[in-house]
Image (spheres, rainbow, N blue to C red):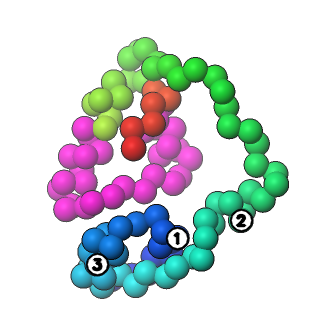
Amino acid sequence: MTGKLALDLKTISTLQFQQLNAENIEVQDTAGNVIDNIWRSERPLTPSNPVFVHDIEYAGQSWQEKVESVRSEMAKHNAFCCVIAALDEVACELVSKICWF
C-alpha cells in the first residue's frame, strides 16, 4: 500500500507512525487539530443527554455485534485502525448511540 495521510502527529504513537511508514504511507503533520480549525467559535455545545441503546428492532444488531463485524473486517485486511467518516457510515455503525472507541 502507498499513499499520503495528513493528521495531527500528537494523536498517534511512535509505533503507529512506524507502521504507516513501513506501508509506504507518507505522513504529513497538520500542525494541530484540523477539526478545531474548522469549527472555530461556531461549534455547538456537546450534548448532555444521557446515552442509550436503541432496541434491536430499530438498530438491527446489538452494538456488540456491530463492533465485532467491524473488527472482523479489519482483521481480514490486517488493519490496525478504522476511520468512519461518511455520515451514512457513522449512522450505520453508531445507530445504537454507543461510542465504542
Disc 1 to disc 2, C-alpha distance: 12 Å
Judged from the image, the secondary structure of the residue bearing numbered disc 1 is: loop
Q: Quadrant of the N terminus?
A: bottom left
* Residue topped by disc 1: 8
Q: Nearer the viewer, residue 63 or 92?
A: 63
Is 17 situated above or below 88?
below
What's the residue at 33%, 58% (across, down)? 81
Disc 3 to disc 2, C-alpha distance: 27 Å
Q: Is residue 87 left or right of residue 101?
A: right
Q: Nearer the viewer, residue 52 or 10?
A: 10
Label 2 environment density (alpha carbons within 10 Å; few <14, some 14–19, many ≥20):
few
Mark closest to the chain's N terminus, 1 or 2: 1
Q: Are marks 3 and 1 in contact (CB under 8 Å)?
A: no
What's the residue at 47%, 73% (across, down)? 9
Label 3 environment density (alpha carbons within 10 Å; few <14, some 14–19, many ≥20):
few
* Residue topped by disc 2: 37
Disc 3 to disc 1, C-alpha distance: 15 Å
Q: Could you say which disc has been placed on residue 18 in the image? A: 3
Q: Quadrant of the C terminus?
A: top left
Q: Quadrant of residue 19?
A: bottom left
Q: Position of residue 80 (x, y in %)?
A: 27, 60
Judged from the image, the secondary structure of the residue bearing numbered disc 2 is: helix
- Going by the numbered disc 3, the residue's amino acid type is Gln
> Which segment did they paint magenta?
68-95
Q: Position of residue 38 (x, y in %)?
A: 72, 62
Label 1 environment density (alpha carbons within 10 Å; few <14, some 14–19, many ≥20):
some
Is 27 situated above or below 72?
below
